[in-house]
Image (tube, grey):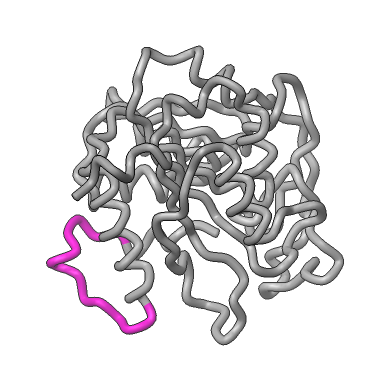
């Protein structure tokens, strides 16, 4: 689930911080530390929706380097292109990421932040005030992460953000070459089965461990579901980087 775009004022110091936002603020602080430590030279914003993460990068993180947003829903892409039109370092690609290149059916939900290549689970279908309901199914372009990396200028210190509503591990497992370009990965991890076939927290941690990453941080990405723990954002770092950090 995406962060609330209306909460993204230009500076944390100028914000009125509500208690329920403390976890989100901690996540932004931790992400900033990670980006500074590895000196990020590329951000892949996969599952960009209408640009919440891009605004986070520009307004909160102070990141001005190359930023590529991947989003398959046409009306969200139109908003992204408007948002990024005056920013030459911010590109928008109209596609979803998966473990292959081709075309695929994409489930657009009533709340389009819930949209996914996966179908909503029976347990949670229609929940969240009806937002977790399929409104329409569209055909979209899909590419593998290896393809996406091969189509941009070279980089070596990338931050990969995955917010693909349950499809994150399939993207990672299909990235035989690309992951060496990303010392840091931020992705949603699920504690409840919101989508059919989506991995849970334990499987996500094990998969990233097998790919050479260690869990660095966990933090909330929304505040609207207490006391239910549905999802959190996680940051993973390449394991070989840890000895270099003080």
Say which residue appears at 42% left-offset and 25% top-offset.
181
Which residue range is magenta in the image?
8-20
Report the number of numbered marks: 0
Q: Residue furthest front?
A: 243
Is 158 inside the magenta-drawn segment?
no
Q: 233 or 68: nearer the eye?
A: 233
Tell me where residue 224 appears, x and y as whole percent: 52, 77
Measured along the vertical axis of the image, is residue 40 above or below residue 229? above
Measured along the vertical axis of the image, is residue 21 above or below residue 183? below
Side of 61 relative to 53 (left or right)? left
Measured along the vertical axis of the image, is residue 48 above or below residue 109? above
Identify the main secondary structure in magenta.
loop
Q: 135 or 49: nearer the eye?
A: 49
Q: 185 or 121: nearer the eye?
A: 185
Say which residue appears at 68% left-offset and 45% top-offset.
167
Tell me where residue 101 appears, x and y as whole percent: 70, 20
Q: Residue furthest bottom?
A: 227
Q: 203 or 246: nearer the eye?
A: 246
Is 12 inside the magenta-drawn segment?
yes
Q: Residue furthest left?
A: 13
The quarter of the image holding the N terminus is: bottom right
Side of 38 relative to 237 (left or right)? left
Q: Residue furthest right?
A: 122
Quarter of image, res 120: bottom right
Side of 107 relative to 47 (left or right)? right
Tell me where residue 231 appears, x and y as whole percent: 58, 66
């Amino acid at each position: 689930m995406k962060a609330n775009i209306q909460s993204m004022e230009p500076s944390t110091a100028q914000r009125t911080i509500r208690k329920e936002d403390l976890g989100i603020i901690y996540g932004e602080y931790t992400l900033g530390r990670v980006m500074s430590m590895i000196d990020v030279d590329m951000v892949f914003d996969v599952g960009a929706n209408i640009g919440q993460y891009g605004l986070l990068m520009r307004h909160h993180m102070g990141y001005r380097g190359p930023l590529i947003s991947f989003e398959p829903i046409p009306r969200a892409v139109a908003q992204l292109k408007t948002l990024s039109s005056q920013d030459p370092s911010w590109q928008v690609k109209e596609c979803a990421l998966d473990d292959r290149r081709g075309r695929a059916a994409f489930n657009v939900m009533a709340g389009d932040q819930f949209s996914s290549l996966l179908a909503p689970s029976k347990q949670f279908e229609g929940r969240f005030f009806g937002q977790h309901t399929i409104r329409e199914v569209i055909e979209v372009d899909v590419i593998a992460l290896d393809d996406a990396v091969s189509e941009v200028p070279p980089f070596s210190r990338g931050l990969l953000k995955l917010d693909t509503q349950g499809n994150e591990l399939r993207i990672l497992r299909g990235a035989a070459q690309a992951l060496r370009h990303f010392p840091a990965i931020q992705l949603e991890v699920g504690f409840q089965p919101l989508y059919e076939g989506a991995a849970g927290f334990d499987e996500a941690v094990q998969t990233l461990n097998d790919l050479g990453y260690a869990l660095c941080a966990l933090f909330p990405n929304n505040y609207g579901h207490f006391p239910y723990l549905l999802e959190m954002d996680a940051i993973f770092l390449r394991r070989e980087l840890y000895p270099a950090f003080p």
